[in-house]
Image: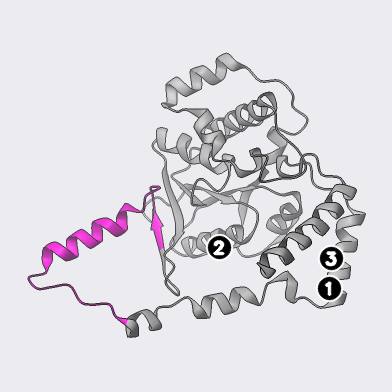
Amino acid sequence: MSENKSANVLVWLDQGPYSFINLAIAKSLSEFGVYNFFGIVATRQDVSFFKEQKIIQFNEILYYPDCYINKSFFDIDYLKIFEKEFDLNLWLDVYGERFFHKHRTNFHNFSQSEILVIVENSIRFFLELLNRINPKLIIMQTAGENIANTLLYKIAKKLKIKTLMINPTHIHNRIVVSNNLINEEISNEFQKIILSLNEKLQNYGPDYIKNQSLVETVKVQHTFNFDNSSIAQKISHYIHRISNDPEHIYQNTGKTKLKMIKSKFASKIETKKEKHF
């Protein structure tokens, strides 16, 4: 990457911690040369932050949900052509989207038509963007987190665009940067180690596991647990939620303030039952 001083880099700034991890990676990459960064944001509340932050300069920030919000039409023939051209089975990818399953949400059961509207418009959005900016690299979290990054990953692979994903290893302070969904970098390295050794592999016993455990990581994560927030913070949070309508992304389809309140109480009751069990 450092040889190409004007390479375009697409950064998937999905909701949650992924967006900030990928922003940090883009920042580190920017120190190796001059790159044109383009960002895809998945929630409206993050748009202003990424436009105003001074960590790196984005040439463009795109709000992904705009491609499907208020859309109601899909072209089944277009989807069939796309499937054939990209060697995909879109319905298998749809089953990987948690929010399309009725057991994942209490707010809305998606119809086949609603799903295909989202899928087709997402495909058109990603194809237009990739063809327009022609990125040399895409930085994203592991594909499969949602239908959007699954489609982006598979389209990019077909177009032979280098895609790097940040995967956890469940070892403290260790990650794997991979360009595939099976982390074959780990198994390939392990095979090299086996082939290069003339003696039995080291026994990774309790001391090694203790030093590499996730205890410290979990402690840090636990400090961000909403249940540990003060009463004042919780009241402020819920007042904000009740006074603002849910963002019109597909994950919020069917949500109303009343349904959200009912769902929260039901979730609390179920949690207590599980703890008792």
Q: Amino acid at mark 2?
A: Ile
Helix, strand or loop at label 2? It is helix
Q: Amino acid at mark 3?
A: His
Query: x%, y% of residue 153?
Result: 48, 41
Q: Residue at x 50, y 32 (%)?
A: 92
Task: Tell me if residue 240 comes above or below residue 228 in the rendering.
Answer: above
Helix, strand or loop at label 3? It is helix
Give the mark nearest the N terminus, 3 or 2.
2
Q: Amino acid at mark 1?
A: Gln
Q: CA distance from mark 2 to mark 1?
A: 25 Å
Q: Read off the magenta span.
A: 176-205
Query: x%, y% of residue 72?
Result: 74, 24
Give yes or no for residue 102 being in the magenta stretch.
Answer: no
In the image, farthest residue toward the top: 77
Helix, strand or loop at label 1? It is helix
For the image shown, how many numbered marks are present on the structure? Answer: 3
Q: Are marks 3 and 1 in contact (CB under 8 Å)?
A: yes
Task: Tell me if residue 123 comes above or below residue 103 in the rendering.
Answer: above
Q: Residue at x 55, y 48 (%)?
A: 145
Q: CA distance from mark 3 to mark 2?
A: 24 Å
Residue behind mark 3: 237
Give the mark nearest the N terminus, 2 or 1.
2
**Which mark is on residue 199?**
none
Residue behind mark 2: 21
Q: Residues within 10 Å of mark 3 (few under 14, many from 20)?
A: few
Q: Residues within 10 Å of mark 2 (few under 14, many from 20)?
A: some
Query: x%, y% of residue 160?
Result: 38, 37
Q: CA distance from mark 3 to mark 1?
A: 6 Å
